Image (tube, grey):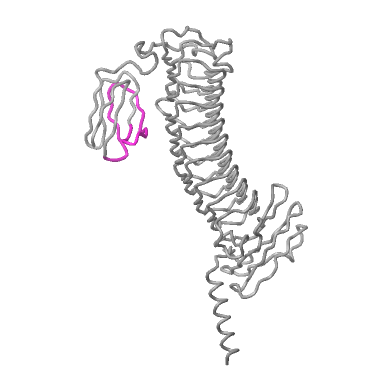
Amino acid sequence: MKKRFFLVLLMSCFALFTSASNYLTFTAEEDNSSFRIKNEGGNNPNVEYSLDDGETWTLLKAVIYNFEDDKDVVLANKGDKALLRGYNLDGFSKDDSKYTYFNMKGKIAASGSVMSLIDGIGESKTIPCEYCFYNLFCCQNLIQAPELPATVLSESCYEHMFGCNDLIIAPKLPATKLAKRCYKGMFESCRSLTQAPELPATKLEERCYEEMFRDCRKLTIVPDLPAIELAESCCLGMFESCTSLTQAPALPATNLDNACYLGMFESCTSLTQAPTLPATNLAIGCYQVMFLGCTSLTMTPEELPAKNLATYCYAGMFQNCTSLTMAPALPATEPVEKCYDLMFSGCKSLQNIKIGLTKWEGEETYSTTNYFWVSDVAPTGTFYCPKELPLEYGENRIPEGWTVEYIDESTAVAEYVSDASFKAWGADGKITYIGATMPVRIYDLGGKLVKEVKGETQSVSVPQHGTYVVKSGTVSVKVEL
């Protein structure tokens, strides 16, 4: 009797332990799906799987040669599941040459915690080593990512984790304290992914978001990035070649670092609006080629407010943005080496530039605008500048064929001439204005540019009722609808 009671108690404890565990789980989304594991560079972690809800466990043997189909775990019917666990308290993979990854056939959705490969039950929230889950899913057939609950990350811990063309559901990323390269290339070439997860960290680390969503060609929804303190190359190429992305996230950071936004939206050919960039002190290459090749970009911040520039800070920033008609105002008065190189090169529709420089070259005879900063812009346009700036023309100076207008000498750089006769009002779901001699910009109360229009008089439809700020030159009018 006592023996029977002990056995029942033991089984109850086992069931309770199993139900409390959060095992990494692979579920077949179509018949005859399968998975295997492969080691590189002599890595050999402990991994077990169960096909009967954790009653029995089998060691998952790594494939050495690709034809070893007998080592595949087959999920014969849609809905079949495999639980996975491992006891690898020192880490699952070790570096980018010594790592272990899963490969799959068919369609498989992952769930449960990836941390069950570390602690056996999926409770840990700490990544134990660098490169821990490097390249973990080197496959095209994963459609849903597992939970990534860790809040303590390590360098390169999720680097290139998902090489999954079919991935449509990304995991939540709760960590607020990041590590160098922690998310580098994490979802690169996940070409079915449409929505990026929230990224709550306010302080970034070196290369932490580098190429994170590069080549995610269906990505249309991205979160605002609340980070206010950046690090070197932290967002380098983050959304490069996301060709369906139309709206950029908010970028409130004012503490920049070298190359922090370099190429961040390069070749985002559907992007129509650039975010506000409030930083007033720049770093080397911080905005370099940030919007290179964004051929649909039509709206930029009204001004890039920085007056303290850095080498290559704006180099190629809007290069080949062929739909851009108006450049953001550039109020800096002192040139810095290579700061504007190629900035508007290839902007075939650009007809309006406002610049604050009072001289073209610095004290050491370097040129601020070498390498054709306005090559191949529109054949006619208006160039606003201080009266002190020498009227020199060409691809490295003022575009040939453009009209020069001097900005308010009392402020040296700040504003277009005031539109004193400008008026605006709202009625019947439209904003009507009169007396505009300069382009008119309509903003919502959050400071987001809603529309940019031209013409002395016009009625403009806006997305919804509310309060808007309508601006022409230095005149701003608040309009209620």
Q: Quadrant of residue 249?
A: top left
Vertical position of residue 122 compared to residue 365: above or below: below
Q: Quadrant of residue 47?
A: bottom right
Vertical position of residue 157 compared to residue 82: above or below: above
Q: Residue at x 57, y 60 (%)?
A: 110
Please give the count of numbered marks on the rendered protein. 0
Residue 297 image point, x, y percent: 46, 31
Residue occupying the far front of the picture: 2
Residue 306 image point, x, y percent: 45, 24
Residue 413 image point, x, y percent: 39, 16
Residue 278 image point, x, y percent: 42, 30
Depth check: give the residue in front, 327 or 77: 327
Is residue 327 shown left or right of residue 76? left
Q: Residue at x 43, y 36 (%)?
A: 252
Question: Which quadrant of the figure contains the N terminus?
Answer: bottom right
Specify start and end residues of the magenta stretch as a single range. 443-465
Residue 461 colored magenta? yes
